[in-house]
Image (cartoon, rainbow, N blue to C red):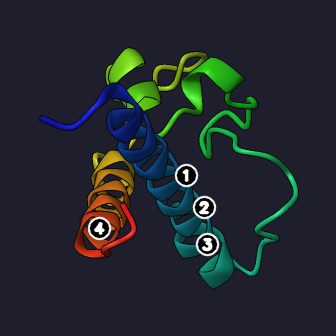
């Protein structure tokens, strides 16, 4: 059975993968519209309110908000957490396939 430190590394890799997936979502949404991928920060496309830090966690934020904007209650596509989860899973799979972990 792996020790606790191994699990911490796997969790960190999943979080980093989820964050990369979150940024990929930003790129997918903004580039076709000619918007900056850096500024402004994450916001609701309906009401333009900034997404709070606690709601900007990959996958968990969407679950906490139950798929709706905190401010205007507009639906948030399930595509966002699915892409974040996919990136997290791929990051963990790559890490587990490497001999150094």
Q: Which residue does the image show at 36% across and 46% down from the upper left?
A: 10
Distance between mark 3 and mark 1 Cα atoms: 13 Å
Distance between mark 1 and mark 2 Cα atoms: 6 Å
Which residue position is annotated with label 2? 23
| Residue 90 circle label | 4
Q: Residue extending furthest left?
A: 1
For the residue pair 73 and 16, the one nearer the viewer reads as 16
Q: Residue extending furthest right?
A: 39
Distance between mark 4 and mark 3 Cα atoms: 19 Å
- Crowding at dot 4, Cα within 10 Å, few <14 / some 14-19 / many 20+, comes out as some
Kindly report which numbered mark, 2 or 3, lies closer to the viewer in this rendering: 2
User: Are discs 4 and 3 less than 8 Å apart at CB?
Assistant: no
Which residue position is annotated with label 3? 27
Image location (x, y in percent) of residue 59? 38, 37
- Quadrant in the picture for the C terminus: bottom left
Distance between mark 1 and mark 4 Cα atoms: 12 Å
Q: Which residue does the image show at 85% across and 51% down from the upper left?
A: 40
Image location (x, y in percent) of residue 81? 34, 46
Which residue position is annotated with label 1? 19
């Amino acid at each position: 059975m792996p020790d606790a430190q191994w699990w911490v590394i796997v969790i960190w890799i999943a979080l980093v993968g989820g964050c990369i997936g979150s940024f990929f979502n930003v790129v997918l949404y903004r580039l076709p519209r000619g918007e900056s991928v850096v500024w402004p920060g994450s916001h609701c496309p309906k009401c333009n309110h900034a997404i709070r830090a606690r709601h900007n966690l990959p996958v968990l934020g969407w679950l906490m908000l139950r798929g709706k904007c905190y401010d205007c209650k507009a639906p948030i596509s399930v595509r966002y957490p699915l892409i974040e989860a996919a990136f997290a899973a791929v990051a963990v799979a790559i890490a587990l396939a490497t001999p150094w972990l």
